[in-house]
Image (spheres, rainbow, N blue to C red):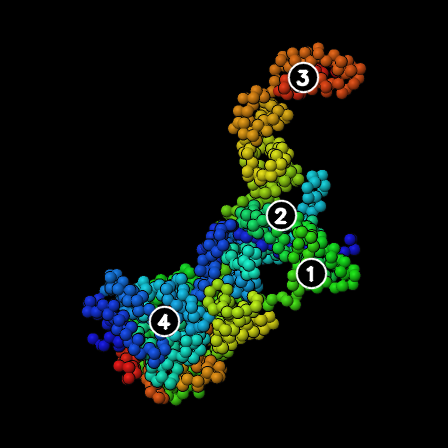
Amino acid sequence: MTDLINAPLRELSAALAARKLSAVELATLFLDRIDRLNPGFNAFIAQDREQTLAQARAADASGKVGARDTPLAGIPLAHKDIFCTRGWRTSCGSHMLENFVSPYDAHVVERLAGAGMVTLGKLNMDEFAMGSSNETSYFGPVKNPWDTARVPGGSSGGSAAAIAARLTPAATGTDTGGSIRQPAALCGLTGLKPTYGAVSRYGMIAFASSLDQAGPMAKSAEDCALLLNAMAGFDARDSTSLERPAEDYTRDLEQPLAGLRIGMPREFFGDGMDADVRAAVEAALAEYRKLGATTVEVSLPNSGLSVPAYYVIAPAEASSNLSRFDGVRYGYRAPEYTDLNDMYSKSRAQGFGAEVKRRILIGTYVLSHGYYDAYYLKAQKIRRLIAADFVEAFKQCDVIMGPTSPSVAFAFGAKSADPVQMYLSDIYTISTNLAGLPGMSLPCGFGQGGMPVGLQIIGSWFGEAKMLQAAHQYQKAADWHTRMPENLK
Amino acid sequence: MSQWEVVIGLETHAQLRTKSKIFSGSSTAFGADPNVQANAVDIALPGVLPVLNREAVVCAIKFGLAVGATIAPRSVFARKNYFYPDLPKGYQISQFEVPVVQGGGLAIKVGAANDPNATATDKQVRLTRAHLEEDAGKSLHEDFHGRSGIDLNRAGTPLLEIVTEPDMRSSAEAVAYARALHALVQWIGICDGNMQEGSFRCDANVSVRRPGGPLGTRREIKNLNSFRFMQQAIDFEVQWQINEITEGRAIQQATVLFDPDTGTTRAMRSKEDAHDYRYFPDPDLLPLEIGPDWIAEVKSGMPELPQAMQARFHAEYGLSAYDATIVTASFSMADYFVTAVASAGAANAKTIANWIMGELAARLNKSDMPIEASPIAAAQLAGLIQRIADNTISNNIAKKVFEALWNGEGSSADEIIDKQGLKQITDSGAIEKIIDEVLATNQKSVEEFRSGKEKAFNALVGQAMKATRGKANPQQVTDLLKKKLGA
């Protein structure tokens, strides 16, 4: 068996089922590792050893370990701090919710707990998921385990760093414009954003409701498929959750790739990406051809509009979604104020960080009387054009591939002074969210500074199984996903 | 006054009678302790999401059908963004660009509110729209020592906001419309109509203009929760606006409040302070789609509407337009009437209507009771009216029986008539005997009658009735008396 910190979930599951290992032992192993290594990365921002061990004991005693329908029972994971967790602080990376303990569990948390998984803690993130580098967290930036002078990506940077440093075998993430895929790419992991509506948003603190989607992050496509089996499914509490029969996302993993048609969008292979990223992505595509797939150039003519459209729609929804953080019922309230308006403005001025305020201001502006048509309505029209581009492209191919991020992980401070540069880090991932499509990122080599490069796969609507098959077959042929930072072994 | 024309449009918030809230499973019952009926969704915890209550949609469909409106096949929920402590999400979920109910109208009677002899004319008030939305909570500014308390029990209660065109031309018309709407929403069972508890509240947009001229600037009187206040507020506002214009001051668009203590309206905020609500479609909710099947299903469960019922009562029972309107003034009233007619037969429908509008209405009024609380059930009244019809009792005795039924002295008219011996005397021999006695003991009246005093005849009838404690058939007494006196 592979060593436990690098073991695929399937192996951990088998070891637990064979009683070679208990959930308590496994949780303890990771808890100790977190205690030892987390201070260097700042990935975990809430831990509760007793609660974790209690969950592990419960898993050991539950009868779920070894049961056919709960293969993840006894395996630990950690949650991005955007998911409400009963009994744990849920901060969303913000001063605003620094002391907020949720009285209820998010649907995703409920599902994974129901599958018998054990919570190791809560993971750092960009404040309210707004950021691509984890530099906007109130709790300080997360550091990339491959090079602690570099960012881990964002907003699910805590999730990515925790897995890269092998502090947890798996984590939950959320992706509004690339927040699962970009950090997965920058930290050398596999992460999947499902089709919009596949995973319930109930209990996931909203950033941009029409774009937000939760998904798994782990070391491999196979791990992600197992996690997605537990996370996905209809939930009546989310009106945008889709009522469709449950799927087994592992069903096609072992199917060979012969005949797979891979679309390469012309717009994703232009000047925008760094040479090291291009080299790794093209090598990966060559590997796919060796595996029997064919590649075809496709076009997404409106993809250049995705960043501007996104930075209208996402802030617009965010400006409204974040109105509930007003200091009245829970969360931060300024210690001193003169009247109601003063309480609102001081609580929100002190409780939110700069990037969150910037997006609230942008969103408020684009929704204002007289600007709504020019910005919000136009952005929604562009959104439909972008979706139509994908419909056309998928007539010629089964999956789309390209880079996840235009560059490998960058240094702290490199882009934080220029929001537009920062926003462009998501140039290849955002159109997927606007179209509601599933997308994933998997490691496909290393670039400048020995930093991981991510290959992005975009599937058609509800094409998760197909994407996972493509990723898994690649991971059987290439071992990039098994690498971990040398000094952490 | 006639040189000014008053223009009024009304916006009414009707609280829908659903068991749970419009976007959460909390109860909507009135009067619970603060915040006990507010769940995670109602207090807008991080991460919660709204789920539309289909019963609220059914209410909107019923309303749309009742006013002949278009039920939008696809309508959209939007967020109305503003900050207030009793608005937990920082936005209200409402409908903005595409409401669920579009157009339609409501007929009102103008010029003869309560007068059976005046000729009322029908007027159609056009509706602009009706849309679904959630109510806010309540801010309580007393008893908190300089602070405010927030009660979120009401937050998320479903409302139907019903908006008219500016079709009303007087406070009386506005009140007539509000009353008709109030009756209708209760009739179709979508609102309990309780104005004290805020289940039905109106805002009036009022302006004045020269007849035929362009519309004047309007001011909106908020939160009118009684018909009397509505009338007073509009009358005051109209006079105020006329005075302003006459004295050369232009009307500024504003929101005003009516103070019932002083009978005046007072500006709350001007147009300049108006919020920019930044409406946009709520991404947490899918567009509301209502297909023909759903509408048909709701339609099949709708009660007959008042206007249809009035026409039917006129055609089948010969009720006058006025009578038909009165007995259909409320669903419970109509239900009472229909039940009584079913029991006593269509031939007695007119008599039943008269009794409901006369004796019963007066008695209920005196006791300040709604008809549903009447101690005399419809079937009991029907039983009483059957005994009048078959001459068992006279109208006068019937009033006694009515009183006895009201006081619970018996379970049916028959029982009371029997127990109290009120059966009419129709045996001619017995009546003749009594008349002979009356004539013998009232010689003076007999002589007066014979000398041409018609009034004396009535006195003799009265004596005969008195002698039978009212039980003699008055017609028989009259006939026999005439025969005896050779008149």
Q: CA distance from mark 4 to mark 1?
A: 57 Å
Q: Disc 3: which chain?
A: B
Q: Secondary structure at mark 3?
A: helix
Looking at the rendered structure, the number of numbered marks drawn on it comes to 4
Where does residue A11 sit, x and y in percent of width and height?
Answer: 23, 72
Which residue matches tag 1? B218
- Which callout, 3 or 2, points at the residue further toward the start of the chain? 2
Which residue matches tag 4? A46
Q: Disc 2: which chain?
A: B
Mark 1 crowd level (few <14, some 14–19, many ≥20, 10 Å Cα): many
Q: CA distance from mark 3 to mark 2?
A: 49 Å
Q: CA distance from mark 2 to mark 1?
A: 24 Å
Where does residue A249 sit, x and y in percent of width and height?
Answer: 32, 69
Mark 3 crowd level (few <14, some 14–19, many ≥20, 10 Å Cα): many
Residue B71 visible? The answer is no
Q: CA distance from mark 3 to mark 1?
A: 69 Å
**At 67% from the left edge and 13% from the top edge, which residue is drawn?**
B435
> Which amino acid lies under the numbered mark 3 shown in the image of this protein?
Ala
Left or right: A390 in relation to B311? left
Observer-nearest residue: B100 or A292? B100
> Which amino acid lies under the numbered mark 2 shown in the image of this protein?
Ala
Q: Secondary structure at mark 2?
A: helix
Q: Is residue A376 above or below residue B378?
A: below
Q: Secondary structure at mark 4?
A: strand
- Which callout, 3 or 1, points at the residue further toward the start of the chain? 1
Where does residue A311 sit, x and y in percent of width and height?
Answer: 50, 76
Mark 4 crowd level (few <14, some 14–19, many ≥20, 10 Å Cα): some
Please determine if labels 2 and 1 lie on a single subunit. yes
Contact (Cβ within 8 Å) of mark 4 with mark 1: no
